[in-house]
Image (tube, rainbow, N blue to C red):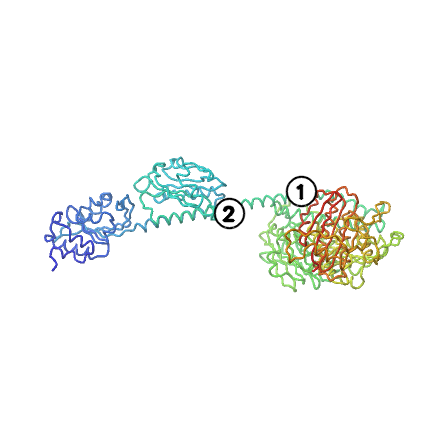
Amino acid sequence: MIRPSTDLFTDGGDTGRLMAELDWTASPLGPVTGWPQSLRAAVRMVLSSRYPMLLLWGDRFSQLYNDAYSALIGDKHPGALGDDVRVTLAEGWDVLAPLIQQAMATGVASWAPALRLLLERAGYREEAYFSVSHAPARDDEGRTVGVLTVCSEVTQQVVGERRLRLLRDLAVRGDGRTVDVDATGARLIDAIEAHPLDVPFAAIYLRDGTLLRRVAWAGGAPGDATVARALPEVTELTDPSTAARAWGLPAAAEGRPTEVTDVGDRLPLPAGPWKDPVDTALALPLPSAAEAQPLGVLLVGVSPSRGLDEAYRSFYHLLTQQVSVALRNARAYEEERRRAEALAELDRVKTGFFTNVSHEFRTPLTLMLGPLADALTDATAPLAPVQRERVETAWRNATRLLTLVNSLLTFSSLEAGQARSDAHPVDLATLTAELAGVFRAAIERAGLTLEVDCPPLPRPVTVDPVNWERIVTNLLSNALKYTFIGRIRVALEADGEEVRLTVTDTGIGIAEQEVPKLFERFHRVRSALSRSHEGTGIGLALVHELARLEGGEVRVTSRVGVGSTFTVALPWTSARPAVPTGSPPTGRGDAARAAVQEAVTWLADPGDGVSEPVPASGSTGDELTGARILVVDDNSDMRAYLSRLLTGQGWRVRTVTDGRQALDAVHRDPPDLVLTDVMMPVLDGFELVRRLRADPATRALPVLVLSARAGGDASVAGLSLGADDYLVKPFAAAELIARIRAVIRRSRASAAPRPDAAPAWSDDIPPAFDANPAAARPAPATTVAPIPTAVEPAADPPGHPADTPTRSAIAEAVGDALDIGWTYPSAPASAAAMRRDVRLALSGLDVDPDVQEDLLLAASEAVNNAVEHAQRPSRPEVRVRLQAGGGLVRISVRDFGTWRDRRPAMDRGRGALLMNAYGDVRLVSTSEGTTVTIEGRLA
């Protein structure tokens, strides 16, 4: 049977058991048997509750509580049972006393949410938060003799919300609005400094090579530099100082988080709610994209009022991540800003260059156009018909060049923001109709119909007439270029909001994916069918920028195969009244007329134009008289010039405008040589060469490529496709004629029957060579001679795989099917001659076309090297030997000079690459010359 004195604590859990065992006779409450019924009832309620409850009874505030409350006071339990609360919670009594006294004095319960208390329940002065209610406790007579306290700890909630606010502030401060990393670090530290209860002090260090540099710090009272003096400013990671090691900076910079103790010895800093000294800090790596090398280090102090538990460490982990992300974003932004500034500076330089060059072009163009116009209009000394044709060609193309210069100058001014609209009130309908009329003859000559619908507008429009002329001219020129059948319609209309110009065509149309890029500068739709491939790619971009300059916009709708409609809209609000800044513009329609002159060159009759030789021009006895040349170019002036130049040599010239027409002409009437441009509509020059070489009937047809595309890449592309020569515009007429003669002569010499017994030559004994300059032929000639099959094999290279044909095996096999050699002058044109000879020599063998072209390209590099590297040659010649058989091939190229380095201007950096891409390459250099041997398979 339970004793009456202890049955009060039954079912009170561990705390009830302890209370039952306690000697209450020694306490102010006395023996349990003497407790009043009100106290017994209150104790039963407290012990039966699962919620933390504390009963204070009597004038000595004796404590009675339950298991839930015992967990809140930590180490103070169980000593607090029956003891005076003023002793147990002495460190927090100054906060609790007013609340308890108020409840006892007034008899009214109180409620205090998130009450901060200082507790020493875990061995340190802890910052804790409780939501507390104090209610009066009455005895059997109804007198207030104590306080019933109901409480719950909300420390984790309060501290967690506070820390989340810090992380949120960091996200706001590190949002990328700063312009550099250091400024971002300062903003982050400012956010951290506003939360000293969680982060008493902090410093951000960033890695700069082998240095760790402090970019920002916080801590201490305002104006107090104690933290700055205690922390290293710069640390050399290869040889860190003692102070840096003490703070854990080198280890953290290597990616190892470090806990630093005894901080108070180095940094006496009071912190926390009760200004206790900071004793612990953390040196934390700032993660970067490269895990092996952190971005830097975040050094933070630990609050003396909070234990460094898992929650606190997790908070610092999140803090480190937030700081790192902000700094990395700032660094990325800074790098992007620097790139943007560099690009902007480059753009400014480019714009300035275009502006300066355009201005500089105008003076020589003036001195070209002026005398040319004078010569054409001079009635006192009229030009002969032939000279007039030449001068007119020069005048047309100088005018076109001036138009290009003006367009570039206008565009560069627009990009630089320096363009201005010299707006005047104009009759826009009349102006537009006049500009469209300038194009009528060219449009009708193209077989198209021009419709102009420009009724009078209700009032004049204030616009820069020069800019408007450029807008209309570019749109009409563009429509004519891409329209082959149907019509072009120009319309002007207005309503209450805007004036609209529409240019509609029935041309090829524009693919939907190309429309968004249509007004980008230099953008051109690839493989679009057009009358000419010529153009700068800034016409529509210029329309877009000029429309914006006038306060309007340009829009486009298009369907492939149906046509396009361009609309330029000028709101009436942008058509503002203006005071003319000068005299009305002169030269009205000049831009339109220049555009029409250029368009006419696209429309000139291409049709199988055949020009017969000029009777008096051919050289007497010249074996090339009557040679047939096919000229392929989409520019009518260039076709006329080449035709006039070549017929003057006694040659028969046929002209066509694109590669497709050239293929038809070649198959209908094979010429002796094809002279082709590269950039042409329908079928370009490179594709023409590719198709000619793929057809056995035209594989040996000589092709000479003319192009305005300069540079090694363009020439390599042309030569690798099988072109015999490549000449860059502008070119000298004499050089073009010389190259044509050389190519035709080599072709005819290679096609001639070969003698059965010709002098042989080997790598050591050269064949006969006529070194007498007086006997030299007018163009580089080719000496063809069979070669004996006996060749001294080269030694096998050490470590050569057994299952791969060695050089000895190749030497035994090659020559069975072909062994032949040639001698060429040491001149740049010899590479083209060699290609033709080798191509013809291999035509009787079953050689894959791609392999053949690779071989020719590699051999060309070897010949070019021989010409460019040979210094003071004993014989001004290059020997080439071709051996084939057994599915293998060897080409040897020999010069007779001492080796020298290639000049940087001539070095394309591709010789060894091209040769090694085909097969094994050997080079033997002696005092008598250098021999390069290229070996590989024929298929």
Q: Quadrant of residue 699?
A: bottom right
Q: Is residue 247 above or below residue 52?
A: above
Question: Helix or strand or loop: what does disc 2 sit on?
Answer: helix
The amino acid marked with disc number 1 is: Asn
Left or right: 194, with 72 as reference point: right
Whichever of labels 2 and 1 marks the residue nearer the N terminus, that label is 2
Quadrant containing the C terminus is: bottom right
Left or right: 385, with 855 as reference point: right
Question: Where is residue 631 drawn, in percent x and y?
Answer: 78, 56
Q: Which residue is mark 1?
A: 356
Question: Where is residue 220 drawn, in percent x and y?
Answer: 36, 38
Left or right: 644, with 49 as reference point: right
Q: Which residue is mark 2?
A: 332
The amino acid marked with disc number 2 is: Ala
Image label count: 2
Question: Helix or strand or loop: what does disc 1 sit on?
Answer: helix
Q: Residues within 10 Å of mark 1 (few under 14, many from 20)?
A: few
Question: Where is residue 746 drawn, in percent x and y?
Answer: 81, 54
Q: Quadrant of residue 805?
A: bottom right
Question: Where is residue 815 drawn, in percent x and y?
Answer: 75, 57
- Which is closer to the viewer, label 2 or label 1? 2
Q: Residue at x 42, y 41 (%)?
A: 249
Left or right: 159, with 547 as reference point: left
Task: In the rendered structure, find residue 937 and report the number of the disc placed on it.
Answer: none
Q: Nearer the viewer, residue 134 or 332?
A: 332
Residue 464 can be seen, yes or no: yes
Quadrant containing the N terminus is: bottom left
